């Protein structure tokens, strides 16, 4: 396996984790706005 | 090895737990609702619930064990730890939908078993859940003590005490709701640290150059994606445990009942991806250490990650690493406290002491008292440095033995309380015989256990296929798995007692459960579960006894 493929294999995981975090942050922001609009609790 | 100063460590811990406490105050209520204390409002949004599920499933041991697997087994090691661990979250999803459908207002899985079967089945499940959560709490406190001792001049006991008091302080008032709310921040800290730390260490070790230098140094097994050693010693036992840990863990069941029902799928899938990426990513540090020829300090693989962090990271990143581990263990420990309080409130006080007519105020007091006692016990056990592995073996075995009875009880009307109980006991006993080789694994005895294990293999594959694709595919896949596994298992599995015993627990419990159920002539109306499992708060009617007449329960 080439060095490039192995580098990708090692560094892809933090990149995916970052993408998941971004998705969760956007979703939380939407939930917070919705909760504020409707006067309900987040949890 | 680089160490943070006492002042820096105390400041980091004070900021972390102080900030977490302030966040938890946002959901504090003067008159807490008992149901909210255990499962929130049953309609938590996607972002919060997926973050909470991910943060809860990642504990301090996830980092150390993934890195150890990467170091021991090479290129595929971290995958064999993180991938199967992630699948534990995914595979509970289809069954979780069924649990929610049958009992939308449930607080614990054991409560559903009480409605389905009665007290003995409930207490087997609740008891194993309680012991499991207490062990998890103790492991997380131990990890806090070890981290503080390695990275600062403070002692192990200081770390245990600070973590125990810090976690209890922000969890005790609002229970599960505090746990979920603070999980988001803790996961954010974990991911941020992982995103920064992994690339820094990779490039500090030479970047892509490390592969050219390191790959020739490792064994062909470690360099192979298809390493047989990695599969048999890491992947397979973990794969077998996938369903057992998912069923046996109240922290996941609690989130299952808390998330908004239409968001379950996206929540579980995202948590699976989130867990896999963080844990496999950190496991890669073990693989990099192997390539760089790093020797773990004192020969202990658990030292690998702290050792790499303190050697290759600048001081600010060591601080980030410290917060990442504290965040991971705190998020799991607060979930364990919430799980323990829900189990004692519902299954011990609500169903058995109050006989289905609990006083909400007393119930809340019981929950908070449970948290205090559990924290004290876990801190004491952590200080005694007990043999955690042995305890985990016993709890894991019991979980393996109850997977089939729990799942089948919620799909097949003929499973009886006697079948559930006898299956759990038989599976557990046979596990002990195989795991500790109480009988000599030779000749007919070994063949018998290998047959049971092959059935267990079929059951695991069959249940997984059943969850996602239904009964017919489940039976076909389970049957095929048995037929394919059996010829390989005979004469071979006896040399792998961990795998043999785990599969035996599944196989024996399934056979006993089915046979004992077929001998009886009982059928159960699943609608009764919803009648018996209801909210506790402001519940005037004695909830559990309401449907007792039309829905027979064997005790």
Image (spheres, rainbow, N blue to C red):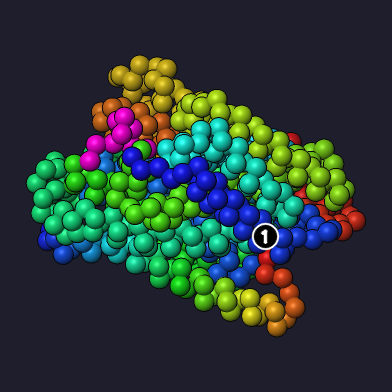
Q: Of B479 and B235, which appears nearest the observer?
A: B235
Frontmost residue, B233 versus A41: A41
Picture coordinates of residue B35 (x, y %)? 76, 57
In the image: residue B396, left or right of residue B364: left
Residue appearing at x 63%, y 47% in the figure: B167
Q: Position of residue B380 (x, y in %)?
A: 61, 29
Residue B172 visible somewhere in the drawing: yes
Which quadrant: the N terminus of chain A? bottom left
Q: What residue lies at 13% left-to-right and 57% top-to-bottom? A: B209
Residue at image coords 58%, 46% = B333
Residue annotated with mark 1: B22
Q: Is B294 placed above or below B450 here?
A: below
> Is B478 on the left or on the right of B416, as rendered?
left
> Residue B61, how many percent across, how many down?
44, 43
- Check the residue under mark 1 and report the chain it is in: B
Between residue A32 and residue B54, name the one nearer to us.
Answer: A32
- Which region is colored magenta? B294-302
Question: Can you name the residue that lies furthest to the right here?
Answer: B540
Residue B470 visible: no
Examine the structure image and report whether residue B331 is included in the region drawn in magenta: no
Residue sitting nearer the eye, A31 or B202: B202
x, y (%) of residue B92?
A: 51, 55
| Secondary structure at numbered mark 1 | helix
Location of residue B532 with respect to B145 vertically, above or below: below
Residue at 25% across / 28% down in the picture?
B491
Which quarter of the figure is the C terminus of chain A placed in?
Answer: bottom right
**How many numbered marks appear?**
1
Placement of B56 over or under A4, stated as above or below: above
The local crowd at label 1, few if under 14, some if 14 to 19, many if 20 or more residues have their Cα within 10 Å, is few
């Amino acid at each position: 396996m080439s060095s490039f493929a192995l580098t990708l294999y090692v560094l892809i995981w933090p990149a995916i984790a970052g993408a998941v975090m971004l998705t969760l942050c956007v979703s939380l922001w939407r939930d917070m706005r919705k909760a504020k609009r409707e006067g309900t609790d987040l949890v | 090895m680089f160490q943070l100063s006492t002042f820096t460590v105390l400041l980091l811990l004070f900021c972390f737990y102080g900030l977490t406490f302030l966040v938890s105050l946002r959901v504090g209520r003067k008159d807490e609702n008992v149901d909210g204390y255990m499962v929130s409002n049953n309609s938590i949004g996607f972002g919060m619930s997926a973050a909470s599920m991910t943060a809860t499933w990642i504990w301090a041991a996830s980092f150390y064990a993934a890195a150890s697997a990467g170091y021991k087994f090479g290129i595929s090691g971290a995958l064999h730890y993180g991938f199967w661990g992630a699948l534990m979250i995914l595979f509970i999803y289809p069954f979780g939908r069924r649990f929610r459908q049958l009992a939308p207002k449930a607080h614990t899985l054991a409560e559903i078993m009480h409605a389905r079967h009665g007290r003995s089945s409930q207490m087997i499940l609740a008891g194993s859940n309680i012991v499991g959560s207490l062990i998890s709490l103790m492991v997380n406190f131990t990890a806090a003590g070890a981290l503080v001792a390695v990275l600062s001049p403070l002692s192990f006991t200081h770390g245990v005490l600070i973590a125990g008091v810090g976690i209890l302080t922000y969890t005790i008032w609002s229970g599960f709701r505090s746990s979920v709310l603070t999980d988001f921040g803790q996961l954010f800290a974990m991911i941020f640290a992982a995103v920064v730390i992994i690339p820094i260490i990779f490039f500090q070790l030479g970047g892509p150059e490390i592969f050219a230098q390191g790959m020739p140094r490792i064994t062909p097994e470690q360099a192979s994606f298809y390493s047989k050693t990695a599969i048999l010693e890491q992947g397979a036992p973990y794969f077998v445990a996938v369903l057992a840990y998912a069923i046996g863990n109240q922290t996941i069941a609690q989130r299952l009942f808390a998330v908004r029902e239409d968001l379950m799928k996206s929540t579980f899938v995202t948590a699976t991806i989130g867990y896999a990426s963080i844990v496999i990513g950190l496991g890669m540090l073990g693989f990099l250490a192997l390539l760089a020829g790093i020797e773990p300090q004192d020969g202990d693989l658990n030292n690998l990650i702290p050792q790499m962090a303190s050697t290759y990271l600048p001081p600010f990143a060591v601080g980030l690493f410290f917060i990442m581990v504290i965040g991971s263990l705190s998020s799991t420990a607060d979930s364990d406290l919430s799980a323990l309080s829900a189990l004692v409130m519902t299954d011990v006080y609500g169903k058995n002491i109050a006989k289905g007519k609990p006083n909400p105020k007393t119930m809340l007091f019981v929950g908070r008292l449970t948290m205090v006692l559990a924290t004290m016990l876990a801190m004491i056990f952590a200080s005694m440095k007990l043999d955690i592995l042995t305890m985990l073996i016993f709890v894991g075995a019991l979980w393996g033995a109850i997977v089939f009875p729990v799942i089948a009880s919620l799909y097949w009307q003929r499973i009886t309380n006697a079948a559930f109980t006898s299956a759990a006991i038989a599976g557990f006993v046979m596990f002990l015989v195989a795991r500790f080789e109480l009988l000599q694994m030779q000749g007919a005895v070994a063949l018998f256990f290998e047959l049971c294990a092959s059935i267990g293999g079929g059951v695991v594959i069959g249940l997984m296929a059943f969850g996602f694709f239904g009964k017919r595919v489940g039976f076909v896949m389970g049957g095929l798995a048995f037929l394919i596994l059996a010829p390989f298992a005979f004469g071979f599995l006896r040399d792998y007692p961990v795998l043999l015993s785990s599969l035996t627990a599944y196989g024996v419990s399934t056979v006993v459960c089915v046979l004992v159920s077929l001998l009886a002539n009982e059928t159960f109306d699943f609608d009764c579960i919803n009648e018996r499992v209801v909210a506790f708060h402001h519940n005037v009617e004695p909830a559990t006894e309401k449907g007792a007449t039309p829905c027979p329960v064997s005790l």
